[in-house]
Amino acid sequence: MKIAVIQFPGSNCEFETKRAVESVGMKAQIFRWNRKAKELRGYDGYIIGGGFSYQDRVRAGSIAAKEPIMETIFQEAEKGKPLLGICNGAQVLVETGIIPGINPGEVEMALAPNKMEKEGRIIRRDYYCNWINLRQEVEGRRCVFTLLLNKEEVLPIPIAHGEGRFVSRKEGLLKRLIKNNQIVLRYCTSLGEIKEEFPVNPNGSLYNIAGVCNPQGNVLALMPHPERANWLRQVPSEIEGEWAKEKLRAWGKQGLMEGEGPGRKVFISMKKYILMAHSSWEEG
């Protein structure tokens, strides 16, 4: 199994994403945006990682979304291959229209600048970096990157973005996404409670949306960074919840500290899906 980690000018998370992929037993290669796009066809999956592609000019992800390499990536995703966009990668997928993909190719959502609200007031805007909690909103099998997650399971994952607020002007889109079970992950408390205000909702995102998949479930736009929560040692001891308790129990035991963190489930799920689906791609 070989994963292409796409590198655009301004990407800055490709190496840690590569290590996260390799930690679950898959091969990973950093694939520059200006290589021959046809070479992508030899990969089993794709990840567009975080950073500031093209310095976030115009809008975050908007220029990278127009690169010719994206057309080949989408063609491969249409075959069922997994495609994960993390942070800036999520912005790229939304700018292309593959997410949410109700009408493929049509841009139906945007990731707007952060707007943190509390008690009816805007208390902060723009870039924010912290650990937050995500709640699995649907059955894990709905999306190939959450196969190992149970419905309503809570994961602590870090965020680091300035434009992560899912919004849409399209009438009825939110209801349709909910009906289709495409809203995979939402911001919540450590107990799984949904609260619309900051800091539980860290960016003002519509419906507390943190991750949205396409109708087929093999493409996910995810604003938080699972690769930064791939090892238990990365989990802060001071956050609330079971993962912090597990970190404290592992304190002083290097083998345990190098064990699985909450974000690794995303990459293990990706591997599991590829193992199940590989034969059908070869036939196709």
Image (cartoon, helix red, strand yellow):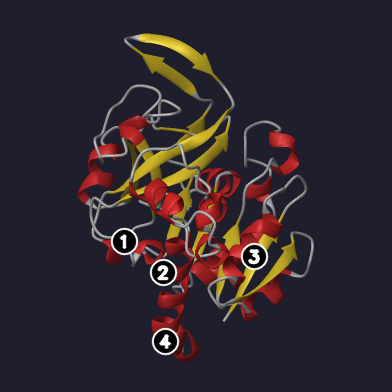
Q: Amino acid at mark 3?
A: Arg
Residue 100 located left or right of residue 4: left
Q: Give the residue number, with chain letter if any, for mark 3.
A: 19
| Secondary element at tag 4 | helix
Splitting the image into 4 quarters, where does residue 73 fall? bottom right
Q: Residue at x 34, y 34 (%)?
A: 208
Quadrant, the N terminus: bottom right
Q: Give the residue number, with chain letter if any, for mark 1.
A: 149
Q: Is residue 109 visible?
A: no
Q: Give the residue number, with chain letter if any, for mark 2.
A: 269
Q: CA distance from mark 2 to mark 1?
A: 9 Å
Give x and y (percent) for residue 211: 40, 47
Q: CA distance from mark 1 to mark 3?
A: 22 Å
Q: Is residue 260 visible?
A: yes
| Secondary element at tag 3 | helix
Q: Earlier in the sequence, mark 4 or mark 1?
A: 1
In this view, the mark in front (3 or 2): 3
In this view, the mark in front (2 or 4): 2
Q: Earlier in the sequence, mark 1 or mark 3?
A: 3
Give x and y (percent) for residue 252: 54, 56
Q: Give the residue number, with chain letter if any, for mark 4.
A: 280
Q: Amino acid at mark 2?
A: Ser
Whether the residues at callouts 3 and 4 have beta carbons within 8 Å, the answer is no
Whether the residues at callouts 2 and 1 have beta carbons within 8 Å, the answer is yes
